[in-house]
Amino acid sequence: MPNKPKYVAIYEWLSEQIKNQAYKPGDKIPNENDLAAMFKVHRMTVRQAIDKLVSDHMLIRKRSQGTFLLSEKKPVLVRSLENISTYYDDIAAAGLQPAYSTIESGIIAADESLAASLGLKPGDEVVYLHRLMLASEVPLVLEKSFLPADLFPGILDLNINTMLYKIIDDVYNMKLMHSRQEIGATMPPDKERKLLRIPDNCPCIWVESVVYNDKGRAVEFSRALHRGDKYRFKCSIGQYLCSDVAVQAKP
């Protein structure tokens, strides 16, 4: 690779060291100053390489302690479309540490579109949550959730930096039975890219979902933005249904 950036060379060297098991999960890697001296580069160049490995979920920084090997390969985050689950489940299954960060919350009036999704009247009060989901301190998913305010009195007084569905189950004794989802791809605007810490050329996967309780009432409408470089989606598909279009033989 001609004119390879120096941070890429350091990234590849560290990746090779990890692949060859020079470091094991939990081991501390050399600090930025030592690596800068080894490669005869500025410390910020080393930081770029380490930032990339942190983003890959292979390294983790621990405040006042240093940088440690988290995983010998990039963990795969999988979102199942077969049942109602939480991001906490996805992240924990990948061996990473889940965390939630609330960006904004409050009570708003439903517009026509939101009211239709939740089976409400325009102007009805809705609980609004804008949250960021992180895995071992790396942002993965940006989600906006809307819930009928009459179903969840006092929810904003609770700790919402946790699994929302667990709150719904434990505190409000409400069972979530099924959901309807739509999926698409997008290039997010600057504000959302900054929150997710992704470059300009990184696409995201959006998922719009309506969740229903055991009484058939819509209890949540959400729109989540998943990092396209981190997430995979899976589902089971039924049998092939042949169409009625006749297949003509070649003359």
Image (spheres, helix red, strand yellow):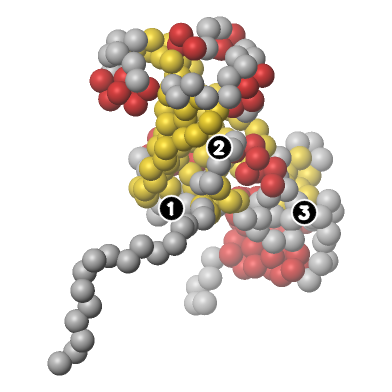
Which picture quadrant has residue 116?
Answer: top left
Marks 2 and 1 close (CB-CB < 8 Å): no
Which mark is nearer the camera, 2 or 1?
A: 2
Where is 108 relative to 1, above or below? above
Marks 2 and 3 close (CB-CB < 8 Å): no
Q: Amino acid at mark 1?
A: Cys
Of all residues, the one furthest to the left in this rendering is 251
In the drawing, what numbered circle is on residue 69?
3
Of the two numbered discs 3 and 1 on the same chain, state the one appearing first in sequence. Answer: 3
Q: Give the SS element for disc 3.
A: strand
Q: Give the SS element for disc 2.
A: loop
Q: Residues within 10 Å of mark 3 (few under 14, many from 20)?
A: many
Mark 2 — residue? 84
Which mark is nearer the camera, 2 or 3?
A: 2
Q: Amino acid at mark 2?
A: Ile
Q: Residues within 10 Å of mark 1 (few under 14, many from 20)?
A: some
- Residue 229 in view: no
Q: CA distance from mark 3 to mark 1?
A: 25 Å
Where is 141 relative to 157, above or below? below
Q: Position of residue 190 (x, y in %)?
A: 38, 39
Q: Position of residue 172 (x, y in %)?
A: 60, 14
In the drawing, what numbered circle is on residue 202?
1
Of the two numbered discs 2 and 3 on the same chain, state the one appearing first in sequence. Answer: 3
